[in-house]
Amino acid sequence: MCHNRRPRRIAVLVFDGVRTLDVTGPLEVFDVARSLGCDYSVALYSCDRSVSVRCSSGLSFDTLAAADLTAEVDTLLVPGGTCLVTDGVPQALQQSIRTHAPTARRVASICAGSFALGAAGLLDGRRATTHWRHLDAFAARHPSTVIERESVYTRDGDLWTSAGVAAGIDLALALVADDHGADVAQQIAKEMVILGRRLEGHPQISVAARTPRPKHPELDRLMATVNADPAGHYELDTVAAELGLSARHLARLFKAQVGVTLRQYVHEVRLENAVRLVLAGESFHAASQRSGLRYGARVRDYLATHCAVPAGAPASELLVDTGGAEAVPVHPG
């Protein structure tokens, strides 16, 4: 349970064209946190005056005026919207960020909200990320920013940025963990029925999503089976016999259409599944066994390397965020 003596005031700067989930995802996290006793106070603010702001989905929010935001702000949160990339960042939004960021304890953006922080000058020489689709555009627009291309979210001191849409939930959970500890964040994730909380350094896209889909229907079904049951038996000879193919032909076909060997793909899926189970509270041994890996040390080493978790840390500490420690991009295989 959380126990605060005074509210942590969270100001969310919204604008016409903002993505709905960029706003509602974090708001849900903080709402569940409040139900657990965390004293968050959250309000939506428009850039210039009190208006109804329309999301890109068509949903509208009533807002307060950012100009009236005079109380102390703990967290200034800037969600994203494709309009920030295609049309540029409105001057009113830039000015609101410049006005309120210096007095906030921390500033965070979701998805293309990083473009707004960049336009306001907050990301010069700092580490940041954004939605994978916009990484090149962001790099061209803000060449002095050190871009983390793989990470689902990035922390650089008091500046937090995240990848697209659903990653805003991961970011909000990380903010709660920073305030109240990993156990509270994990409790919120369970309450929201989130499959697994991702840490800084986790790739934006899962193994299945970032792997090319094969044209051969039998390979497509094989990959779906591996994704659904990582701990299954997928030796090349056995799988080839089941598919009515020679082992050599299956190996050649899989590498040509998927880009990695069957063994590499199975290992990546197993490791990803084991990491998810550990972050959900499983022991290294249990997570490894359930995922088809022989040794829990591999999962521990992966977390230590890619998610900035100390290699000697006990499982109970794996949910603790590391305050912006350097994250190493994931290179599977």
Image (cartoon, grey):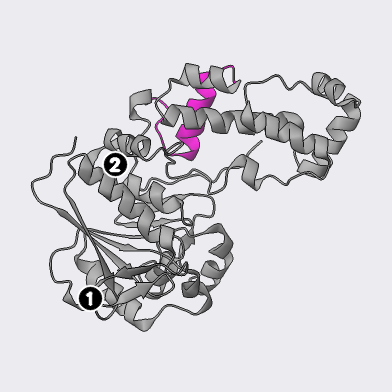
Query: In x, y percent, where is residue 91?
Result: 36, 83
Of 45 and 35, the residue lying toward us: 35
Q: Per the image, is 156 magenta?
A: no
| Mark 2 surroundings: few (<14), some (14-19) or many (≥20) residues within 10 A | some
Q: Is residue 12 left or right of residue 257?
A: left
Q: Is residue 149 above or below residue 328?
A: below
Residue ID at (24%, 77%): 50
Q: Is residue 106 left or right of residue 152?
A: left
Q: How many marks?
A: 2
Q: Is residue 4 left or right of residue 110?
A: left
- Which amino acid, by three-letter code, is at mark 1? Ala
Residue 312 visible in the snapshot: yes
Q: Is residue 315 left or right of residue 222?
A: left
List the residue tagged with mark 2.
177
Query: In x, y percent, where is residue 71?
Result: 12, 67
Residue ID at (45%, 36%): 196
* Circle number at residue 65: 1
**What is the residue that sits farthest to the bottom in this orientation?**
91
Residue ID at (86%, 37%): 253
* Circle number at residue 242: none
Where the N terminus falls, by quadrant? top left
- Which amino acid, by three-letter code, is at mark 2? Ala
Chain part drawn in magenta: 293-314
Number of the front mark, 2 or 1: 1
Where the C terminus falls, by quadrant? top right
Q: Is residue 289 above or below residue 177?
A: above
Closer to the chain start, of discs 2 and 1, is: 1
| Mark 1 surroundings: few (<14), some (14-19) or many (≥20) residues within 10 A | some
Residue 156 visible in the snapshot: no
Does dot 1 land on a helix, a strand or a loop? strand
Query: In x, y percent, where is residue 193?
Result: 41, 37
Q: Per the image, is 310 magenta?
A: yes
